[in-house]
Image: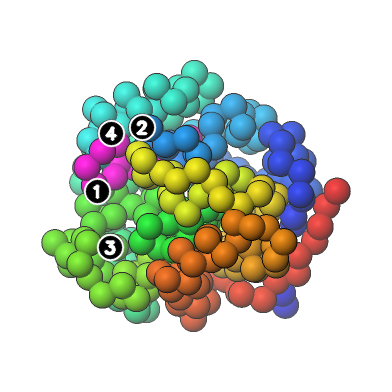
């Protein structure tokens, strides 16, 4: 059976909430709301006020983890300052999940590249997960969406280096590239397994730069905004976003974004994820006014 992906071309905070209500998947217990807090200096990340109606409706805690590269989010002290400066604490309860160790270890017995995923210790506090992703390009992964949020986003600082190095954190920037992409799929699978279906995924195709929100100096968006997608399947929602980029043949910035995705073999993350079986590349796109 094809996975359902709901899609609206209207991009407003209210439409995000409307789509969440439409999918009819209540998230219960302590809900982790995975966002990208935005690197200091980045102009493209989705601000807290964009997510506020949805988060107010769902409740729960905004969660993040520290980065593994130099910047303003690679230590807990700096990351808290960035989170506060970007306004997250003005609206929401926030948890940097790897603020204190030791990391939680998730087993990946069938992993292609890694058999363990190191995630923020505080993940153990949560019963369900809402993944709020800004779909855009990425300097290493080619693109960033739901799978990257599950993998790199939930990983601790050490876990991020471990994934990038395909199991060898000292090779964070030098590992075989496709092995890194497969390690991302492995890591994402472990988080999906951990929540046992108690998860919802939202991708917003807005401010689509070739660069990620982790870049302090990022290119301005190159494509027109496309819309909001929501699904219970992280693989289907990322595949649908990729397909919508390809379909935007009249957008003058499309080829620039596709060059970033294709030059980094970004679709291989989706291919590897589908082979691991925690979702499907086959989907039904249901457009909502």
- Give the number of the mark in front: 1 or 4: 4
Q: CA distance from mark 4 to mark 2?
A: 6 Å
Neighbours of disc 2 within 10 Å: few (<14), some (14-19), many (20+): many
Q: In the rendered view, how is the structure colored? A: rainbow
Which dot marks residue 40? 2
At 60% from the left and 61% from the top, the residue drawn is 254
At 75% from the left and 69% from the top, the residue drawn is 284
Q: In the shown orientation, is residue 223 left or right of residue 106?
A: right
Q: Nearer the viewer, residue 21 or 40?
A: 40
Residue hosting label 3: 164
Residue hosting label 1: 68
Confirm whether the magenta stretch covers residue 67. Answer: yes
At 44% from the left and 25% from the top, the residue drawn is 86
Q: Main secondary structure of the magenta part?
A: loop
Disc 4 vs disc 2: Cβ atoms closer than 8 Å? yes
Disc 1 vs disc 3: Cβ atoms closer than 8 Å? yes
User: Is 43 located above or below residue 160 in the figure?
Assistant: above
In the structure shown, which secondary structural element does the residue marked by tag 3 occupy? helix
Residue hosting label 4: 72
Q: CA distance from mark 1 to mark 4?
A: 11 Å
């Amino acid at each position: 059976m094809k996975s359902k992906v709901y899609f609206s071309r209207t991009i407003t905070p209210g439409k995000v909430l409307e789509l969440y209500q439409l999918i009819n998947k209540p998230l219960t217990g302590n809900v982790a709301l995975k966002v990208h807090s935005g690197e200091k200096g980045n102009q493209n990340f989705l601000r807290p006020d964009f997510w506020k109606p949805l988060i107010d409706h769902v409740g729960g805690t905004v969660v993040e983890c520290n980065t593994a590269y130099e910047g303003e989010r690679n230590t807990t002290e700096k990351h808290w300052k960035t989170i506060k400066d970007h306004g997250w604490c003005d609206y929401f309860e926030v948890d940097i999940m790897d603020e204190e160790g030791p990391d939680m270890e998730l087993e990946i017995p069938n992993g292609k590249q890694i058999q363990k995923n190191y995630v923020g210790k505080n993940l153990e506090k949560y019963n369900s997960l809402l993944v709020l992703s800004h779909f855009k390009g990425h300097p290493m992964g080619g693109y960033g969406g739901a799978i990257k949020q599950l993998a790199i986003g939930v990983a601790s600082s050490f876990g991020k280096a471990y994934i990038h190095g395909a199991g060898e954190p000292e090779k964070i920037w030098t590992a075989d590239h496709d092995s890194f992409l497969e390690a991302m799929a492995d890591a994402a699978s472990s988080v999906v397994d951990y929540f046992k279906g108690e998860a919802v995924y939202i991708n917003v195709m807005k401010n689509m730069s070739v660069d990620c929100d982790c870049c302090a100096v990022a290119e301005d968006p190159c494509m027109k905004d496309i819309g909001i997608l929501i699904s219970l399947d992280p693989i289907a929602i990322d595949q649908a976003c990729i397909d919508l980029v390809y379909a935007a043949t009249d957008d003058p910035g499309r080829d620039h974004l596709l060059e970033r995705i294709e030059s980094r073999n970004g679709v291989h993350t989706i291919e590897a994820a589908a082979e691991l079986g925690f979702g499907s590349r086959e989907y039904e796109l249901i457009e909502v006014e």
